[in-house]
Image: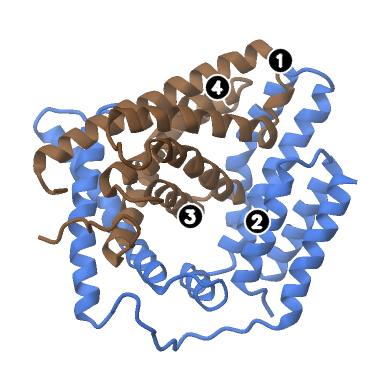
Chain colours: A blue, B brown
Amino acid sequence: MQINPSVLIIILLGIGIPMAFVQSIPVNIVVCMIALIYLAYRRASIKTITLVGLITLPLALGTGWSFIAFGTGDVWHQAWLQVTRLFAYVLLGMTLTLTTHVKDILFSCVLHLHLSPTFAYGLLAAFNLLPRIQRQVKIIRYSANLRGLTYHLWQPQLYFKAILSALQWSNDLAQGMSSHGFSEGFPRTMTYTDTLPKWQWLLAVVLIITYSYFGFF
Amino acid sequence: MQTVQQSKAHWSLRDVIFLAIIAIFFGIIYQLWSYMYYVLAATPLKPFANDATIGVWLMAGPMAGVVLKKIGATFLGEILASVVEMLLFSSWGVSTLLAGAIQGLGSELGFTFTGYKNWGKTGLALSVVTSTIVTFAWDLFSNGYLHYNFMMLVGLFSVRLISIGFFAGVLVDWIKRLLDRTGLLK
């Protein structure tokens, strides 16, 4: 049993937006724990969770420390609040990204959240190019090095060449997809199906209301 | 060669793919920054690390705007960049998505104020101002900036304005000029 990606997105936004204003440390910790329980239940990779946690640790340290150094009022409360909020956001994000494939997220949004298929397929096409895009950045930098040049990140050349590649590839991909029968704005036969029982929407509403209640009152 | 659609509202498959690829490029290029960012971010200077590099995150939106010249291109460009980031390079989780929406809104507002007529320096400059204000207002709450002392806030705001001004303003304009010279965007 898994929560449908569309419902999960609504839950993440419904909790994530008010979380920017909530001032309660225990509520943040409860969110972290529920997210961790869901991750454990879905058997998400413990290694990845630990790794992301370790990467976040110095950021959390910096965040907390900055309030103690430059804060006003109850600095320790703010420090812990921001640290727990940081982890709550990261863990909430992982409940979606570590349990669901990009393709399932996009198609679920088409089925249940009215995302246009043009966007879903367009994004999917671009995601599949990821390794090539990574290689292209290396190629652009190395070929500059061969000519004795270094493209710094504050100069336009690297971005300019990246955008030229993006322009060319998006043309090629869009033409390729059209020639494989993808027509924009026309109804599509969806062979993709997923399950979304009504109680999951109810779960989303209950979670968001409960969160707001304990977060603000 | 197929060119950019004239319509100001219609999103073609090509536009979507183009924006998504730009977003991935920017995501990868940002990783080149991350080492410097992490060194600063583990100290109390973290908010300054945030505000000094925020301009890079904000490039995708205005870049999409000035290239595609469409209503909503800036907003959508930024949202797409944040979706890509969250799904591919997520070390921030949901806050990436929320920040992306806020940043997109901020940058888009500048072009809205020109009535979507100016995609040049004026539009970019306005976009820099609106995105600095909107993202700073969001961070007052979401990153608890309200609880820093006043001088710290003045410093952070200035650093943020300079960062966004350079990366999402000047640098985007330079890139745009190089692109114009190729004639591929006409």
Question: What distance separates the C-alpha of mark 2 from that of mark 1?
Answer: 30 Å
The quarter in which the N terminus of chain B is drawn is bottom left
To which residue does mark 1 refer? B149
Q: Position of residue B15 (x, y in %)?
A: 29, 59
A175 up-or-down from A92: above or below: below
State the residue in front, A64 or B19: B19
Question: What distance separates the C-alpha of mark 4 from that of mark 1?
Answer: 14 Å
To which residue does mark 2 refer? A13
Residue sitting at 15 percent across and 28 percent down?
A: A149
- Which chain is mark 3 on? B
Residue sitting at 82 percent across and 25 percent down?
A: A76
- Check disc 2 and give the amino acid type: Leu
Specify which label sits upstream in the sequence, 3 or 1. Answer: 3
- Check disc 3 and give the amino acid type: Val
To which residue does mark 3 refer? B83
Question: What distance separates the C-alpha of mark 2 from that of mark 4?
Answer: 27 Å
